[in-house]
Every structure is written in structure tokens, then in C-alpha cells.
Image: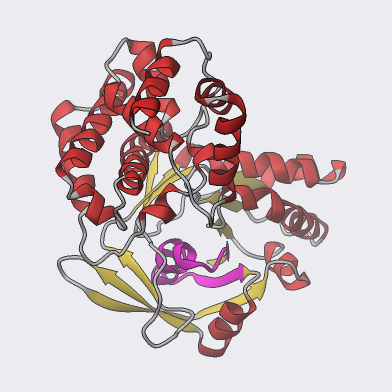
Amino acid sequence: MKALHFGAGNIGRGFIGKLLADAGITLTFADVNQVVLDALNQRGSYQVHVVGENEQVETVSGVAAVSSIGEEVIDLIASVDLITTAVGPVVLERIAPAIAKGLHKRRVAGNDAPLNIIACENMVRGTTQLKDHVTAALAEEDRAWVVEHVGFVDSAVDRIVPPSASASGDPLEVTVETFSEWIVDKTQFKGPLPAIPGMELTDNLMAFVERKLFTLNTGHAITAYLGKQAGLQTIRDAILNAEIRAVVKGAMEESGAVLIKRYGFEPDKHAAYIEKILGRFENPFLKDDVERVGRQPLRKLSAGDRLIKPLLGTLEYGLPHANLIKGIAAAMHYRSAEDPQAQELEVLINAEGPQTALAQISGLDAASEPVIEAVNVYNATK
């Protein structure tokens, strides 16, 4: 099997790319970072530091790389069996035209072998959104062929891969936690289902997408926002603070109550899942900065993301949400000179006031009880 992976950053190399290469798949990365591309092509391998109780260094080998904005990537799309991405949600639209060109070339070349595309992004149904961008970029004569021969497979991914600076200055070295989870919707594949160690197939993807979003992502973000407010630097520093930990765990329990109602998760097993995530936040080997985890607050406060979506679930089922409200208020306080969204958030709050600003960002009614509750907490924690 041959695969093309868009995104040779830390997540691409340390998570999805590693799983594909470890499975014996011939893997080519596509990226715009020429330093990383050159290093991958010169060496054909890189090292991954897996940190936790049993720290180890694993070598990923047999890989190559191409520019994601050149002709080579279009040629590869016309010939590979699998395309994956780890580029970030906002970049999916940018790579769609190249994928559309590659699919056109594949059709014209008469390559009718099944091709599956999986966006491995920190978002809900990212592949479906990529499919919409690709379809918009396709010529009319290609669309029916793509529907028949190309599977757009949604997935849920979970592995903490913080930015890490190599002591040796190696642009390819990457650090990851031991835990990883890659769950894909087996109903969306074209052709035989792949057997890739570390890829879990399911016919109920949304249960796992929301479990991860409402637990890992919700807890991670609230830890970051409360940690930033408290002047703490890392996720570990923040989660070891008793007051912050109580709010974070409380928020995950509130969002978990939604999941238990919606999908029938067993309460004991979900409680254990929450404890496992809290333990991951405590990992002393991961130097995960609260500012990195908290970035893009506008996206994280939007209706379909990790703070508002679980809140909407509590409203749907009439469940408590006091800790989620505290997390939302903390997100409204997030400021960073390095993050344009944080600056935009500050401007919006100063111009419109926190109540109108939160309503605009989240889609909630400005006069609704949760908006008023969040604004009260926001004002009380200035």
C-alpha cells in the first residue's frame, strides 16, 4: 500500500505518519516547510521520543517527502491508495485544489483502484468538510467518478504532541505521549477495509468523536484558560492546581453526563476515561504550554466546538453545567500577543461588551441564561 500524508509537522510525523510507516506502508509526506522536506528526503527516517512511564526513542524509516504546492504531489494523488492529513482545520480548504487536480489526473489515467482520504484533524467530521472543499474544486466531469471511486472517511484522533525543541537542533525530532487513539468510520471506505495497527474501525464514529471532543478537548482547553488566568505556564502546572483541577474535572463530568445520555456510555467506564485524561495532563515529560493549548479562542468558543457544544448538550438534557460556564468565562479572558484570534476576541469584547460578544461568537441567545451566567463569572474574575 502507498500513502500520501499532508502535513509533516509534529502531529504528522509523531502520530499518523508514524502509524502508517510502522504498518509497512510506503509513505510520502507533503508539506511547505522546505527544511523539513529536505531533511526527510536526505535521511528517509526520523526519531520519535515516546514519553511516559517507559520512555523510549523509536525510529520511523522508509519515508520520503514532496512539496504540497508542486506537481509531484498531484502525481502521487493519482497513484496512491490512501491520503491522510494533519494540517489543521483552516488548511484543509487550501489543500483541496491540489487534491482535486490529482483526482482529475487519476481519472484521466484510468486508475479506478479505490482511494480513501482521511482528514486526521482536531475537529468534528473534518473529512466531510474536506470533501466539500474538494468537490467545489472538481470539474463537473470528475464528480461522478470521484463519488464512485473515492472514499472520504471521517475519523477521531487523540494524541498529545506538543511543540518540542530538539537538543541537537534536529528539525525532524518529535516528542509524543504514549497514549494514542485513531478511530475511523468504516462505513465510508471504498474497497476493502485496511488493516493498520493503531487504526480502530467503528460504525458509530460520532460517539467517539464527541467523547474525545467533550472530554479531552474540553478538559484541555479549560485547563489552559484557567492556567493562563492563574499565571501558570504548562498544562501540568495548571492541572496540579487543586482549584483548577476541580473545575476541569467537574466540566468533564458535566459533558460526560451528556455523552452517557446521548450514547449510552457506561458511567463507570466513562469516569475511568476522565481519570486517564487527567493523568495524561499530568505527564511530567510533556512540556505543553497553556498558551499553545488555549490558542484560537474564537474557534473554541464556536457552537460546534469543545466548550459550547457540550454546554448545548446539558441544556438539551436539563443537566448541570456550572463548571463548563467557568471554562467559557475563562476562555473569554484569554489573551496572547502571539494569537490573532485572542486579539480579535479582546477587540470584540471591548467594542460590544462581553454579553453581545459571547452571543456573536457562540451563536447563543444574548439574553439566554447560560450567556448571562458566563458573563457574570467573566465579570467576577476580572
137 sits to left or right of 168: right
Residue 56 placed where, x, y %? Answer: 24, 76
| Residue at 80% in and 60% down | 105
Foreground pick, 156 / 196? 156
Q: How is the image coloured?
A: secondary structure
Relative to residue 234, is residue 239 depicted above or below?
above
330 lies above or below 34: above
Would residue 25 appear left or right of 68 to someone viewing this image?
Answer: left
Question: Which one is nearer the viewer's eye here, 271 or 246?
Answer: 246
Q: Is residue 262 left or right of residue 312?
A: left
Above or below, comparing residue 374 to residue 138 in the picture: above
Q: Foreground: 111 or 42?
A: 42
Residue visible at 56% across and 21% down? 356
Measured as percent of width and height from the top left, residue 222 is found at 34, 39
Q: Is residue 91 visible?
A: yes
Asked whether residue 209 is drawn in magenta, I would say no
**Which picture quadrant has residue 2?**
bottom right
* Residue 10 on image: x %, y %: 46, 67
Residue 209 percent across, percent down from the top left: 41, 37
Q: How many marks?
A: 0
Report the span colored magenta: 5-30
Residue at position x 30%, y 57% from top? 234
- Can residue 190 be seen here? The reply is no
The C terminus - image quarter: top left
Q: Tell me: 38 left or right of 177.
A: right
Judge whether residue 8 is colored magenta.
yes
Residue at x 80% of width, y 62% of height: 109
